């Protein structure tokens, strides 16, 4: 991959690792290709039951045919299970973890950078949260005003019109939506903090091992 003149080697290395990881993951998905009775080609995650007795191809995510099926006497589900058992894993869990570790130490140069990245993400989340909170507060104020007006009308023996009631119901629905968004944002913040805390602990483990190796005195024997 060629690096932009404005891209540092560190950023280029991070992007390269990410692209490699995504490419490994994307190759795991299969697509089925079959023809209908009119000879028209179709693609999908599974062959429809009405065409299950027709020959079909199995394609990987790159569009390459990895199996052509003529004998459809074996159910597609059974054949798919057999293929999964026959295929060797593209990448082991141990290798995936090693790649993740390498990416972590390339991405950050210190624990402080991890904490800074956390604060930046939380700050962006906080901006979105403030917008939702302002909407929630303004909706609450509008509800209070509508309820006050409705109460005044009832005291004056004037009925609440269907339009007024529809407007009040709409405000309640908007507040419920804002409440749901606030809960979602709170859960997102919790997940972000957990993710960075996990990265920080893993980074400390990886770099402490490196420090121990560097500081270990030479063998005098």
Image (spheres, grey):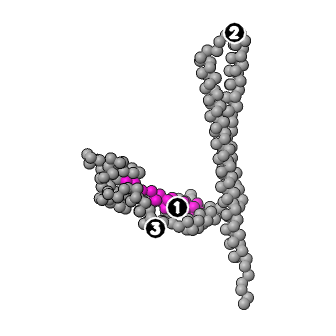
**Does residue 73 appear left or right of residue 17 in this picture?**
left
The answer to which quarter of the image holds residue 162 is: top right
For the record, the magenta segment spans 10-32
Residue at 65%, 12% (x, y): give it.
159
Please report contact status of discs 2 and 3: CB closer than 8 Å, yes or no. no
Residue neighbourhood size for the residue with mark 1, other residues' Cα within 10 Å, grouped as few (<14), some (14–19), many (≥20) = some
Quarter placement of the C terminus:
bottom right
- Quick one: label 2 or label 3, which is nearer the N terminus? 3
- Quick one: label 3 or label 1, which is nearer the N terminus? 1
**Residue under numbered circle 1:** 21
Give the number of the disc on residue 88: 3
Observer-nearest of 13 and 41:
41
The answer to which quarter of the image holds residue 153 is: top right
Q: CA distance from mark 1 to mark 2?
A: 70 Å
Observer-nearest of 179 and 63:
179
Q: CA distance from mark 3 to mark 1?
A: 17 Å
Q: Is residue 212 above or below residue 41?
A: below
- Quick one: label 1 or label 2, which is nearer the N terminus? 1
The local secondary structure at tag 1 comes to helix
**Residue under numbered circle 2:** 157
């Amino acid at each position: 991959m060629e690096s932009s003149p404005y891209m540092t080697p560190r950023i280029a290395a991070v992007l390269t690792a990410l692209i490699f990881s995504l490419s490994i993951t994307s190759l795991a998905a299969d697509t089925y290709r079959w023809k209908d009775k009119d000879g028209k080609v179709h693609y999908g995650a599974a062959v429809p039951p009405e065409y299950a007795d027709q020959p079909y191809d199995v394609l990987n995510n790159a569009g390459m045919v990895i199996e052509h099926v003529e004998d459809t006497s074996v159910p597609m589900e059974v054949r798919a299970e057999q293929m999964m058992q026959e295929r060797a894993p593209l990448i082991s869990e141990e290798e995936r973890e090693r790649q993740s570790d390498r990416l972590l130490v390339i991405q950050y140069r210190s624990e402080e950078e991890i904490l800074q990245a956390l604060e930046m993400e939380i700050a962006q989340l906080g901006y979105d949260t403030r917008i939702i909170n302002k909407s929630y507060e303004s909706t609450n104020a509008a509800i209070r005003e509508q309820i006050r007006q409705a109460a005044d009308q009832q005291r004056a023996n004037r009925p609440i019109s269907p339009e007024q009631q529809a407007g009040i119901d709409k405000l309640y629905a908007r507040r419920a939506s804002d409440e749901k968004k606030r809960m979602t944002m709170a859960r997102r913040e919790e997940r972000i903090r957990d993710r960075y805390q996990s990265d920080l602990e893993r980074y400390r483990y990886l770099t402490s091992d490196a420090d121990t190796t560097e500081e270990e005195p030479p063998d005098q024997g």
